[in-house]
Image: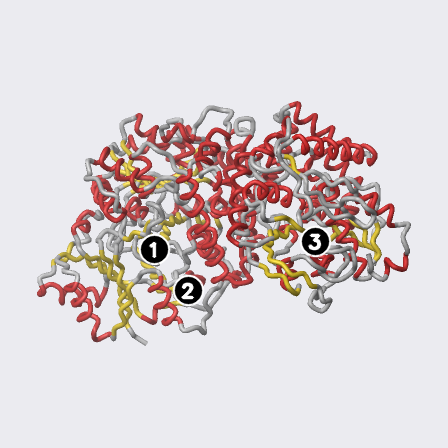
Amino acid sequence: MSGSRVLTPDLPFDMSPRADVAGRDVKLQQFVNSATQIKDHGRVNACRAAFGDRYDAVRKLAGEIKQHTLDHLDVYLDRFIDNATASGALVHFAADAAQANAIVLGIAREIDAKLCVKSKSMVTEETGLLAALEAIGVKTIETDLGEFILQLDHDAPSHIVTPMIHKDRTAVARAFVRELGAPYTEDPAELTRIARDHMRRQFRSADMGISGANFLVADTGSLVICTNEGNADLVVASPRVHVAVVGIEKVISSLEHLSVFLKLLARSATAQPMTVYNTIITGPRKPDDLDGPQQVHIVLVDNGRTEILREETRELLRCIRCGACLNACPVYRKVGGGHAYGAVYSGPIGAVITPLFKGLENYPDLPQASSLCGACFEACPVYINIPAQLIRLRRLLVERKLMPGTTRVAYRLWAMTLRRPWMYRASAAFQRIVLRQLSTSSEVEDRAGVNDRVSENGRDMVSSAWCAKLPGPLRAWTLSRDMPVPPSGSFREWWANRDRGSDASRRAGRP
Amino acid sequence: MRIALFITCLTEQFYPRAAVAIVKVLEHLGHTVEFPAAQTCCGQPMFNNGLHDDARDLARRMIEIFAPAEHVVTPSGSCAAMVREHFLHLWPERSGEHRAALALAAKTSEFVEFLTKVERVDLRAMRVRWPGSVTYHRSCHLRSLGLCDEAETLLDQIEGVRRVPLPRAEQCCGFGGTFAVNYPQISAGMVSDKVSAIRETNAERLVCNEAGCGMNIAGACRRALPEVSLITIGEVIAQGLGLLPREGGSMNADHGGGGS
Amino acid sequence: MNEKVLASQPQNDRLSRENGRGCSRAEFLQRVRGALAVPGELDSAGEARRDLSLVRLVGGDADCVGLFIERATAGGLCVHRVKPNDLMKVVVQMLSACGARRVAVSVPGRVGQSLREWLAPRGVAIVSIEIDGSLDAQYDADVGITDCDAGLAESGTIVLRGDAERSRGTFIVPPIHLAILRESQILPDMLDYWPTLSDCDGIASGRDGSVHGVTNRVRKVPTSIVMISGPSKTADIEGILITGVHGPREVHVVLVDDR
């Protein structure tokens, strides 16, 4: 499947086929499981080593700072635009993907660009910028090593931070032979050297550098770009024109606040104290600067963010794209990484913002494919309550009648029995009978003698019977596990009978 | 104090002895336990699946039923979280219903939470004795209650308990209520990971206080690790105090009688 | 090309609208305001003025030099401590040890001058970094030598700036980077770095340990500030750590004891 198809599937998107295939792919499971667990444990260790007991308080502080900025985003954006302009940058405004692409293509045409080098920008993946550039004959090379390899191999990223989590070295080797004419080698250091040499030639001859930004600093009009490879530093300074494409939610107010996020970002993403390169760029080359690009363009992108900015979902824009929630999420692990989400943004954050960006009716699975375990909330450095946002989307599924009618009816009937104690007890008794029936008709024997114990009133309070196969919609349960059969003894009967017992003996704590 | 038991639908249906154990332990500690018979379900399945009108009705019902209680104890962390956290989001702040929900939240505890934070038990001092090799599964909802290793601490206070920490304990077991049925392959992958982790401990018993997790993991162990069986911490403590018989033991009140 | 450099923002807006390439600033901000409850207001308490001491990792009383060396080394920087008199000798020795023939020197002032004087007679070619703002010549350099703006003890980080005397390519293009840092430049924490940048009055704010967000002043910051905490790294291929992907594979910090 070509890279672009992976992240732009047919809609509405059904997660199950990809999840099923990934579930059976032993090698993929090993890769994704170990990589995410190492990073997740690493995050906890790094953050506890740095912040100790203050870790949660620091996360809350970071969340509050971002929330404040979003609450007043118009003021801070205004300030950023003024200061960026004063520094000599040209600021552009893209309401949607089409405008964003048109702006960049326009700049490319104006400077007669033939070759661009690019560092990581998820916004440009949203807008499909590279394909748009290619359509007018402008070649763009991804320079982040993982993205470079994926581009070469016509594949798509599967993780926000470590995009090649699903790919092994042999796939890289084959891609290099095929696309670069390089000799076959599986040695990662050799492969990296081949990529580096190839990309350095591109840096030297590129007309334009395209980047994203991790943060926009309102007080100074600066772009902040964080990488471990240093490719962004070459992208922004080697060519004569630098274009930064950035979502509006990246604004923070000051350099001081930047400290908070820089201290959290790398620890949350890769368990490092600091990303190797944190670069703060303020405008193009000044008249007496030694070097640097002659033009800096900043394309501020909305593309659905102002919708998410509404109060109910605003916290989602705090996201600093660290990937910690992806690394913590058991669902992300089991579905083999980002491809199963069928969109640019995967993992827990993707499960919420993708339906918001692309329409809940197009991605109904994403908010439902979660056990609401809360690991994402616990990992998030800016304290986004993702489980609450997932539940909100599930409520919208019901309100917009996107939940199948039969399911809705079943839940309503269930709720009805729960409102009336006699119906509740009757249905429980009915379940008990049915499950006992199914148990004797299955091949599972009771493990008699181990757990069968008689309560003091002579009834079973513990059951050792199981069902191996349930009928109808509950069949899914027994695909991978047995269903316990309820014991025949009931708590309410035990309770009712014991009330007749001696008060004194009960207060003395004897059975 | 007077404690109303909020039994929860899954515990009532599948693990009633776990509720019996809690009653006995609370009474042993000198409390009077009540059981409001009108209780059914806190509405968590409806809430989690977006049927918030139904969830509101059930929540309202529950708040009324438990209003007279001095304190409420429940064996389920997820149901406690429902009351303490999610009930509050069902009505606008400053409404009468919201205030009533706050009042119930303020007096509702999960069982281990009650023992460690309210009662502050010392099981060593109480001479609880329960020989056996166990590993403990921490259910995800304890996160939102602010609990972490309280249950493990309690287990470690019990004489005779040989507890092996469960590897990768932070990974969800895959129950998630209707998630297990709606996304069976993903859920199966998660519970399979959990069973592998249990296998690594070589423990004989899995201690798990959450009925949903328990059903899920025990059901998977049935197929892949049948030598491990499930027990709740309430039952361990009650057995360790001689309030409940242990498997293989007799009915009389000696602590931890025969058997393993 | 020059006209483009000088294009003003209002003109840019007009161009955008005319070419149908984007929307105007006013329209764009209106989209943002539409989502906010009380647009346009920033109450007096609301300048996100918060005590950031919660994130301070190193206090002023710590052994900053010791911590810097420890953490820089943990991050993969090689730290070499020298006395001021030995600086040139050590640099020349390091260059000869790695067989450097061509070196880019982005060190202003007296130290830069001394470097040139020491290197020229030793057959080391100094790559020019001052050709029409391009980094191209530096691609042929074996080593890039820079000074530093500061060191951060909290993370073993060196901070470099790009300005009239300092290239934006020397720390990133050549495969080996040699950074000259004075011990007196080492600050405890990143929070201590920002006050060292001058404000719009042209007065340096000094290291008064202030931790609150200073928001009403616009800082005059250099065009480029780069915080470097290790050699260029990636683990994209199967999580295996490789250095020298794009930036240098080796970063050496020559730490001058000037205290």
Q: Which residue is mark 2?
A: C154
Query: Callout 2, which amino acid?
Result: Glu
Give the vertical position of A443 relative to A257 (above or below): above
In the image, B37 versus B252, the foreground residue is B252
In the image, A53 versus A79, the foreground residue is A53
Q: Position of residue A481 (x, y in %)?
A: 58, 38
Left or right placement of residue C137 versus residue B176 in this view? left
Q: Which residue is mark 3?
A: B248
Q: Are marks 2 and 3 on the same chain?
A: no
* Helix, strand or loop at mark 1: strand
Query: Callout 3, which amino acid?
Result: Gly
Q: Would you call the spot at circle 1 few (<14 residues within 10 Å), some (14-19), or many (20 or more)?
A: many
Query: Callout 1, which amino acid?
Result: Val
Left or right placement of residue B42 versus residue A474 in this view? right
Give the vertical position of C197 relative to A253 (above or below): below
Front tag of 2 and 1:
2
In the image, A412 versus A111, the foreground residue is A412
Q: Would you call the spot at circle 3 few (<14 residues within 10 Å), some (14-19), or many (20 or more)?
A: some
Q: Residue at x 44, y 73 (%)?
A: C62
Q: Residue at x 24, y 33 (%)?
A: A179
Q: CA distance from mark 2 to mark 3?
A: 60 Å
Left or right placement of residue C149 versus residue A217 in this view? left
Front tag of 3 and 1:
3
Q: Position of residue A178 (x, y in %)?
A: 23, 33
